[in-house]
Image: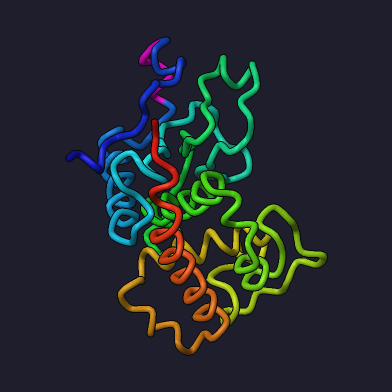
């Protein structure tokens, strides 16, 4: 069974219109595929992905539009407009920007970026699960809400400065960190707020694996 396959099932039109546009993209297909499959394997290990089920729907592709605000990647979770459809965008896809820059520190790598975007993908795939009390209780607001006041960064409470942007980014950063450190979560014992969030995400993953996975089969 090939569980960890490249999921760009319908190549974007810009990829079909000429190889010259690929010059904008510094990341190779092979590197993106390697990282994408690595995260899919992690999701399979924790129980959020099986062949044809749940997060197996999520794909990944390269975006030919450069970023002007430093965004390296995004998950497309909006309804696809006629223009976006013409440009080749598909709902349920992770897109990497052609001018993306990735670092070597945790949270800055391509691998961690992919983990982060899969966190958003999970919320898109199963919004009803994220509307449950666990999310608001842990992250202070609903997934798509914003805080009344942006909290100051406190490393005992937040994984990163970016996590203070809004609840869904706090979740995605926590989810990213859980996948990377799921076997050594004790390292966060001196960051009690972060450790508590990781525990909630761990429990949410377990619950989704046990009660949601089989309901979201891909027909």
- 60 w.r.t. 41: above or below: above
As drawn, is 211 to the left or to the right of 76?
left
As drawn, is 118 to the left or to the right of 52?
right
x, y percentage for residue 109? 39, 55
Residue 19 painted magenta: yes
Residue at 48% from the left image edge and 89% from the top image edge: 190
Residue 84 painted magenta: no
The residue lying toward the viewer, choosing from 63 and 50, is 50
- 141 w.r.t. 68: above or below: below
Q: In the image as oriented, which residue stretches furthest toward the left? A: 1
x, y percentage for residue 195? 49, 80
The residue lying toward the viewer, choosing from 10 and 219, is 219
* Dominant secondary structure of the residues highlighted in magenta in the image: helix
Q: In the picture, which quadrant includes the N terminus? A: top left
Q: In the picture, which quadrant includes the C terminus? A: top left
Residue range in magenta is 18-23
Q: In the image as oriented, which residue stretches furthest toward the bottom? A: 190
x, y percentage for residue 127? 59, 49
Residue at 39% from the left image edge and 24% from the top image edge: 23
Residue at 56% from the left image edge and 62% from the top image edge: 171
x, y percentage for residue 68? 62, 38
Q: Quadrant of residue 158?
A: bottom right
The residue lying toward the viewer, choosing from 2 and 111, is 2
């Amino acid at each position: 069974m090939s569980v960890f396959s490249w999921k760009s099932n319908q190549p974007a039109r810009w990829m079909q219109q000429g190889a010259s546009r690929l010059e904008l993209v510094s990341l190779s297909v092979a590197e993106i595929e390697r990282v994408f499959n690595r995260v899919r394997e992690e999701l399979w290990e924790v129980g959020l992905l099986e062949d044809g089920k749940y997060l197996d729907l999520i794909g990944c592709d390269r975006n030919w539009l450069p970023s002007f605000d430093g965004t390296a990647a995004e998950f497309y979770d909006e309804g696809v407009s006629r223009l976006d459809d013409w440009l080749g965008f598909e709902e349920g896809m992770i897109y990497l920007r052609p001018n993306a820059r990735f670092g070597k520190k945790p949270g800055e790598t391509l691998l961690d970026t992919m983990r982060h975007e899969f966190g958003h993908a999970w919320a898109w795939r199963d919004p009803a699960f994220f509307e449950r009390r666990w999310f608001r209780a842990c992250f202070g607001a609903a997934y798509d809400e914003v805080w009344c006041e942006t909290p100051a960064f406190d490393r005992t409470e937040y994984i990163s400065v970016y996590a203070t942007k809004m609840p869904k980014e706090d979740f995605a950063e926590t989810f990213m960190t859980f996948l990377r450190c799921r076997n050594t979560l004790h390292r966060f014992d001196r960051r009690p707020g972060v450790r508590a969030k990781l525990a909630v995400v761990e429990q949410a993953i377990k619950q989704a694996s046990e009660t949601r996975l089989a309901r979201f089969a891909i027909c």
